[in-house]
Amino acid sequence: MDRGDISWKKYLSYFKYWFLAIFLLAVLAAVLFAASGKGKTAVRTNSECDTPERVFDYADVLTEEEEEALREKIAGAQARTACDIVLVTLNESLADYARARAADVGALEPYQYTMVCADDFYEEHGFGYDRPNGDGVLLLDNWYREADGGVYSWLSTCGRAEERFSSAMIDALLQEALADVERDPFGAYARYVELFVREMTRTGAAPDIPVFVPAAAALLGTALFVGSGLKGHKGSRTVNLTTYVKGGRPELKRQKDIFLRKTVTKRHLETQDGSGGRGGGGGGGHHISPRGVSHGGGGHRR
């Protein structure tokens, strides 16, 4: 056998653990990339929606450039979540609108005006990524101060979005997204889209785990694996404790550990129940519209 072949085989034998480690890390990277949802798009199956528009800025609080930027953001978000994502802004009293709908929905309080208007808007246009009145969400933000002094918004959920969002999740989204809406409308509405995507793309009920956590765990496991493999390549020990000791018997200095003090620290561990938490079953604000469509949702006052 050629000496070159022998040396090459020895080379492969020695570094095989490193090659295996690189392979495992590559597989991990591929899995994390797939789990992150990057590059993943859904196919829209609702052909009955009567408009491709998703940004209805009737209050005129956005510039044309901001509207276009939101449209682009929403287009990407819809492909990731397989949900229609709609924004409607108004700057008018909805009292007359609510009175006109009283025969169908009964008498309404001012905080409920936006709910009925949002549900109607969703249904009239046939929004839904999979079918009319299907998977999707609509934020209606009315800038008008109603007679009771409130400025109201409503997040209407439908289909998978209704199943996903609990009342607590809706409240949290509206509080965070609209916290600074009057100073920065574009930033607030962009945040609405981002928060919706974050919740809809969670892989389970547990909170998101940063990518570096499983990556670090895998890296540590790989290092331990490689280390245990390389350990077998070490040469046998040729010396021991008495090799260089006169007479072959080591002399050990006497040592004693002295106990100085004892400190006990008590820490209360917080527990968290599943009521109203993230991933808590969804269906927050469930109600049936006069057209028989199931919606979820929640409101916000400023």
Image (tube, grey):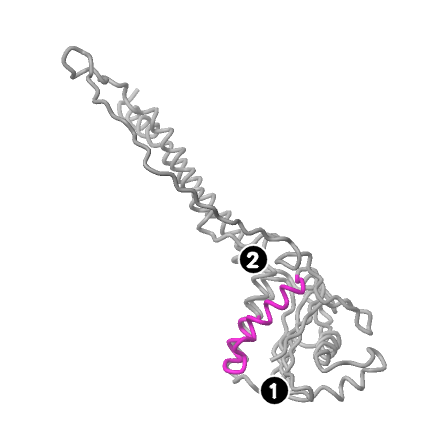
The furthest residue to the left: 246
Instruction: From the top left corner, tell me how far across and down residue 74 is, in percent.
Output: 57, 71
Instruction: From the top left corner, tell me how far across and down residue 119 is, in percent.
Output: 73, 75
Image position of 132 with respect to 270: above or below: below
Do the numbered discs 1 and 2 sit on residues whose CB atoms are within 8 Å?
Answer: no
Q: Main secondary structure of the magenta part?
A: helix
Q: Earlier in the sequence, mark 1 or mark 2?
A: 2
The quarter in which the C terminus is drawn is bottom right
Q: Toward which corner of the image does residue 172 lie, by quadrant?
A: bottom right
Q: Is residue 52 left or right of residue 190?
A: right
Helix or strand or loop: what does disc 2 sit on? Answer: loop
Helix or strand or loop: what does disc 1 sit on? Answer: loop
Instruction: From the top left corner, tell me how far across and down residue 162 is, in percent.
Output: 70, 64
The furthest residue to the right: 103
What are the residue bounds of the magenta stretch? Answer: 165-192
Q: Residue at x 64, y 64 (%)?
A: 168
Question: Marks 1/2: CA distance?
Answer: 34 Å
Mark 1 sits on what residue?
Answer: 59
Mark 2 sits on what residue?
Answer: 40
Residue sitting nearer the eye, 50 or 122:
122
Instruction: From the top left corner, tell me how far across and down residue 60 is, in percent.
Output: 58, 87
Determine if the magenta segment contains residue 55: no
Residue sitting nearer the eye, 293 or 11:
293
